[in-house]
Image (cartoon, rainbow, N blue to C red):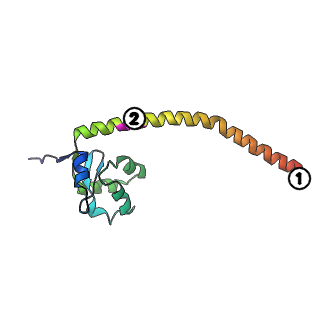
Amino acid sequence: MAEEAVVFTFEEIKQLTDNKRNLLVIHNGVYDVAEFLNEHPGGEEVLLEHAGKDATENFEDVGHSTDAREMMAKYKIGELAESDRKALEKEEKSRVADSSSNSDNSSSWKSWIIPIILGLVGTFILKSYLLKQ
């Protein structure tokens, strides 16, 4: 008979995270990494910083190896509640929409400011060169 997965809400995760337990969420899985703190190659601070939170984005940004991903199974204690998953999905969609609109604004800004700066620098260099002669 298969074991039923333990389901945690973010509120429970925050309440259960203390000096003995360090719970965090990665890809909707709940992990207790307290035993791994001293072994973590990036130092324990990074795990403590994400205690009680969703660390998925940071986990992926670092680019963990296949071995690291396999090692995670040892520390998995449950799954994130469906209601909190939906809240995370909404937050992620909002963050992606904000970043894409910000990147559009910044790229259009960069498209004209960089040439102006390069033109000014070039003018300064040319004037300096001509004055020396």
Secondary structure of residue under mark 1: helix
Nearer mark to the viewer, of 2 and 1: 2
Identity of the residue drawn at 22% across and 54% down: 16
Q: Which mark is residue 94?
A: 2
CA gap between label 2 and label 1 equals 56 Å
Q: Where is residue 6 shown, x and y percent of the image?
A: 17, 48
Q: In the picture, residue 67 is in which quadrant?
A: bottom left
Secondary structure of residue under mark 2: helix
Toward the right, the furthest residue is 133
4 or 68: nearer the viewer = 4
Check if residue 129 falls in the magenta segment.
no
Q: Where is residue 128 shown, x and y percent of the image?
A: 84, 50
- The residue that mark 1 highlights is 132
Q: Which mark is residue 15?
A: none
* Mark 2 closeness class: few <14, some 14–19, many ≥20 residues within 10 Å: few
Magenta stretch: give its range.
91-95
9 or 28: nearer the viewer = 9
| Left or right side of 16 for 26 | right
